[in-house]
Amino acid sequence: MRASRQINHDTVRGFKTSVSNDFYGRSFKPFQPLLLSYKNSCYSYPAVDPNGDYSGGLDIGGSQTGSCRDSAGQTYVRGRWWNDRYAIMYAWYFPKDQNVVQIKGHRHDWEFVVVWINNPDDTKKKPELQGCSASAHGGFKKYAPVPGYDVKDWTHPRVKYYVDTAVFGTHSLDLTGDDGDMSRHIQWEQMTAAARDTLDNHNWGDANFPMGKNFEGNLRNAWPF
């Protein structure tokens, strides 16, 4: 395996949608959140390509959205049973997290949502959305049940990436009543080994990739019931 390289944030070619062909993999799209990046926020970008080459991100400075509003995005997804619910983590990478006065923030940002459903392999009835936890400054905003106005078609949580003025004006996630978009989603287990290794072991500065070695700890802390 060759060494991974840093490349410009807007040249990373992400993965096409790919999930396992089973009940679990087929549950990822029906419950995928609709992500809305507010006007003072970057769009999500692919963080790695199949070779394991990674985004260099953007340093803070200039506009909050400078050079980071021209991406179709990438959603990373991983699921597993946790207690008596099935947890699906959806994660997004943003090239920077910057507040309006340019004194707070950092290169690279990882944010994620954990969607909690009941049994996805029950052949007698469809799984149901039972809870949602959104990452916010090292903690979570937890909902169980999820307010109906924050959900589209009963299964898709509406999620905003926005400036949290209560915490120095840096970015986090929360539910919203406004529609966003779904980007191509790639399951953790369907990615190349090179991509998984980079995601989990690269130094993302003040941000932490949530889905590899941090996965179980994040599920434990995100539990909303």
Image: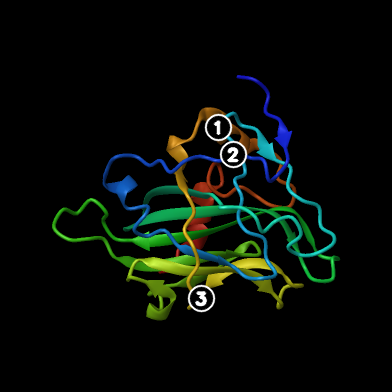
Relative to 53, say whether 130 is above or below.
Answer: below
Q: Nearer the viewer, residue 180 or 122?
A: 180
Question: Left or right: 131 with respect to 94?
Answer: left
**Residue highlighted by disc 2:** 13
Check disc 2: other Cα within 10 Å, few if <14, some if 14-19, many if 20+. Answer: some
Q: Earlier in the sequence, mark 1 or mark 2?
A: 2
Q: Given this view, does label 2 or label 3 mark the residue nearer the observer?
A: 2
Q: Earlier in the sequence, mark 2 or mark 3?
A: 2
**Residue highlighted by disc 1:** 50
Relative to 218, say whether 187 is above or below.
Answer: above
Q: Earlier in the sequence, mark 1 or mark 3?
A: 1
Separation (CA) of disc 2 from disc 3:
29 Å
Q: Residue furthest left?
A: 124
Separation (CA) of disc 1 from disc 2:
8 Å
Amino acid under label 2?
A: Arg
Q: Residue furthest front?
A: 70
Relative to 82, say whether 224 is above or below.
Answer: below
Question: Left or right: 115 with respect to 171?
Answer: left
Q: Quadrant of residue 63?
A: bottom right
Check disc 3: other Cα within 10 Å, few if <14, some if 14-19, many if 20+. Answer: some
Q: Given this view, does label 1 or label 2 mark the residue nearer the observer?
A: 2
Amino acid under label 1?
A: Pro
Labels 1 & 2 near each other (Cβ < 8 A): yes
Identify the element where label 1 is drawn.
loop
Question: Left or right: 122 with respect to 114?
Answer: left
Residue 157 appears at what percent x and percent y?
43, 68
Residue 110 appears at what percent x and percent y?
63, 54
Q: Which mark is residue 176?
A: 3
